[in-house]
Each structure stands twice: as structure tokens, then as C-alpha cells.
Image (cartoon, helix red, strand yellow):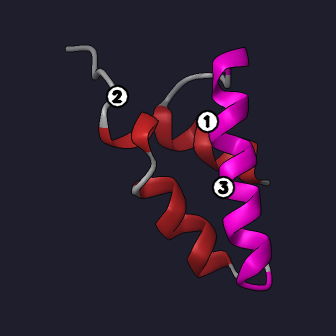
Amino acid sequence: MTEKLLAYALCRQIEGYDDIVVDRLMETIAKDGYRMQTLITEVVTSYPFLNRRVQN
């Protein structure tokens, strides 16, 4: 679920270098009891999401 939501948010498929981000997201989400609110918050505040390139 985490990988799919991150891929959707980034408008691209998850690449090998995204594994570190997914691992960090999973750690944080697990600490908060796997709440959906935490998952969404962590995805939209993640480095790849905040620094993504949008094609015109």
C-alpha cells in the first residue's frame, strides 16, 4: 500500500532508489499503528514528493 500510494503521489513508478524512502515511511507508519492518516502525511512530506519534477 505504501509503495502504491507513493507511486501515485509521484505520478511515476517506484524505482530502486525509492526503497530507502519506502523503508523510512514504513518505520514511521508502524510506530503509529499503521494509521492511514500517518501514511498520507508521511508521503506528502517526503523528500521525493516535495522535490518532484512536474512535466509541462
Which numbered disc, 2 or 3, marks the residue closer to the eye? Answer: 3
Q: Is residue 48 magenta?
A: no
Q: Nearer the viewer, mark 1 or mark 2?
A: 2
Mark 3 or 1: in front is 3
> What residue is drawn where x is 64% and y is 28%?
18
Where is residue 43? Give x, y as percent: 52, 55
Q: Quadrant of residue 27?
A: bottom right
Q: Secondary structure under badge 3?
A: helix
Question: Image point 40% across, 56% down: which residue?
Answer: 45
In the image, the segment drawn in magenta is: 15-33
Crowdedness of circle 3 by 10 Å Cα count: few (<14), some, many (20+)?
many
Q: Residues within 10 Å of mark 1 (few under 14, many from 20)?
A: some
State the image quarter where residue 6 is shown: top right
Q: Is residue 30 left or right of residue 22?
A: right
Which residue is denoted by mark 2 in the rendering? Answer: 52
Q: Position of residue 26 (x, y in %)?
A: 76, 58
Residue 29, placed above or below residue 47? below
Find numbered disc 1 in the image and state the secondary structure of the residue it sits on.
helix
Asked whether disc 2 touches disc 3, contact meaning CB atoms under 8 Å apart, the reply is no
Residue 25 tag number: 3
Q: Position of residue 4 (x, y in %)?
A: 72, 43
Between discs 3 and 1, the one toward the N terminus:
1
- Provide the residue designation for mark 1: 7
Q: Residues within 10 Å of mark 2 (few under 14, many from 20)?
A: few
Q: Is residue 32 left or right of residue 48?
A: right
Which picture quadrant has residue 37? bottom right
Q: Which of 20/9 is in front?
A: 20
